[in-house]
Image (cartoon, helix red, strand yellow):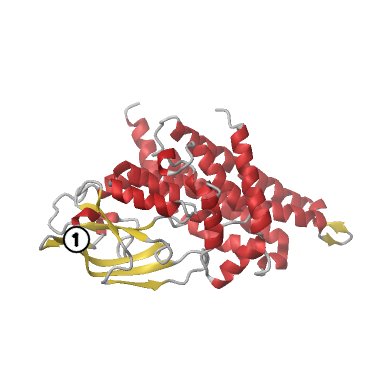
């Protein structure tokens, strides 16, 4: 595997750095975070510069690229202090290309061109997080229409994204693997109400409870094949895990670089704190973890680009990177001391935000379960 960047990739990353340095400095994201405001200007700029359309076919107005390039973009945005966790648009569109209708795909592509992901994914419910079989939101048919009833929770982007992809079950379905379907819904539809949840981090994106009370939709709102909702989303989950790993890598690099600069300048007892072995040991261990994270993310992206299965590697990658990133950013805060614990220092925001990566997209425990099961299967017949 050769991870040397191509000229096109170098130019892409340079353009991201230039855009963020010129138009979106650290103060911009600090303000959005404080106001719990979606950074719409930044997302629009990503759309205008084609960054949100990486990996999207040209016929849909996109820029074809491999998965490594997309992960590099997420990493670079996060490395410069931006909310890389918001870059899920290409992943949304990939779903629609795989199993959405032409009309749904056209709507999704039009939205993504603005930089905003086209839809929020409404899966989780109060009694059903990791255990998807416990989902209780239903769809029923009456008089040629479909009606959705139930409650979703922890739905990211529900207030900002123009559409919602709702996972609902057929109450008459017998096979739990074939009773869930996907429905394309306008979140402003009659019968939908939302309650914003207030979180420790990820303030630049809403997370909501969503209540669906007799929400009427047309049959044309079905996404993909009826009863195959989770089968359609399986690949989505694997790419999502890798995207979270790439997002974890970027903030770790950002915090490491801020802490290393601080250590080279902060004077105590007549010397920079970077001259003390305890601080050097922290920086060394942080650098090792970042290098491991980079290699892991790039390798898994390379596997996907070469049509290799990500079932095991994406789970391992997310598990390692989300944990390692939290350790790196925590050490960065320790090096910064009291300054790092203030809201004036962006490390405090990174420290809050990174914790979500060990929960969203599959918890540490679920990643361990998925990976462990795959490892046992690989060696069962050897």
Q: Position of residue 320 (x, y in %)?
A: 51, 46
Outermost residue toward the top? 382
In this rendering, position of residue 370 left or right of residue 26: left
**Residue in view at x 22 percent, y 46 percent:** 225
Residue 312 vs 187, above or below: the answer is above
Q: Quadrant of the N terminus?
A: top right
Location of mark 1 (residue): 139
Q: Residue at x 49, y 56 (%)?
A: 86
Q: Nearer the viewer, residue 85 or 132?
A: 85
Q: Position of residue 18 (x, y in %)?
A: 67, 49
- Say whether residue 109 is left or right of residue 146: right
Residue 373 lies in quadrant: top left
Extreme residue toward the right, this view = 270
Q: Identify the image quadrant of residue 131.
A: bottom left
In percent of width and height, residue 106 lies at: 35, 49
Q: Nearer the viewer, residue 109 or 72?
A: 109
Count of numbered badges drawn on the protein: 1
- Give left or right: position of 30 versus 198: right
Q: Nearer the viewer, residue 123 or 56?
A: 56
Residue 91 image point, x, y percent = 42, 47
Which structural element holds mark 1? strand
* Relative to 82, residue 295 above or below: above
Q: Residue at x 39, y 64 (%)?
A: 158
From this viewpoint, is residue 232 visible?
yes
Residue at the image position 65 percent from the left and 44 percent from the top: 14
Q: Residues within 10 Å of mark 1 (few under 14, many from 20)?
A: many
Res. 5 visible in picture? no
255 or 315: nearer the eye?
Answer: 255
Which quadrant would the C terminus be assigned to in this image?
A: top left
């Amino acid at each position: 595997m050769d991870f040397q960047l191509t000229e096109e990739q170098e130019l892409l990353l340079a353009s991201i750095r230039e855009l963020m340095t010129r138009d979106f400095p650290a103060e911009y994201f600090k303000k959005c975070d404080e106001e719990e405001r979606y950074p719409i200007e930044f997302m629009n700029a990503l759309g205008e510069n084609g960054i949100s359309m990486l990996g999207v076919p040209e016929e849909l107005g996109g820029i074809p690229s491999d998965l490594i390039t997309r992960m590099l973009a997420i990493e670079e945005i996060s490395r410069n202090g931006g909310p890389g966790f918001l870059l899920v648009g290409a992943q949304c569109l990939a779903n629609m290309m795989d199993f959405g209708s032409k009309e749904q795909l056209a709507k999704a592509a039009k939205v993504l061109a603005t930089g905003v992901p086209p839809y929020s994914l409404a899966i989780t419910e109060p009694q059903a997080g990791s255990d998807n079989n416990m989902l209780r939101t239903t769809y029923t048919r009456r008089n040629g229409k479909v009606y959705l009833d139930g409650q979703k929770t922890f739905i990211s982007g529900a207030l900002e994204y123009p559409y919602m992809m709702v996972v609902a079950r057929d109450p008459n379905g017998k096979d739990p693997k074939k009773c869930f379907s996907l429905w394309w819904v306008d979140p402003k539809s009659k019968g939908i109400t939302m309650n914003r949840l207030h979180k420790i981090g990820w303030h630049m994106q809403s997370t909501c409870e969503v209540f669906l009370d007799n929400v009427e939709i047309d049959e044309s709102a079905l996404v993909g094949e009826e009863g195959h909702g989770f089968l359609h989303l399986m690949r989505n989950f694997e790419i999502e895990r890798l995207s979270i790993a790439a997002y974890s890598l970027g903030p770790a690099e950002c915090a490491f670089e801020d802490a290393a600069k601080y250590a080279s300048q902060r004077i105590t007892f007549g010397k920079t704190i970077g001259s003390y072995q305890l601080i050097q040991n922290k920086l060394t261990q942080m650098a090792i973890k970042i290098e491991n994270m980079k290699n892991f993310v790039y390798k898994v992206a390379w596997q996907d680009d070469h049509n290799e299965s990500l079932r095991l590697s994406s789970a391992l990658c997310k598990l390692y990177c989300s944990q390692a990133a939290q350790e790196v950013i925590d050490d960065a805060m320790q090096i910064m001391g009291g300054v790092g614990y203030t809201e004036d220092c962006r490390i405090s925001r990174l420290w809050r935000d990174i914790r979500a990566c060990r929960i969203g997209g599959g918890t540490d425990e679920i990643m361990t379960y998925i990976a462990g099961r795959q490892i046992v299967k690989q060696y069962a017949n050897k």
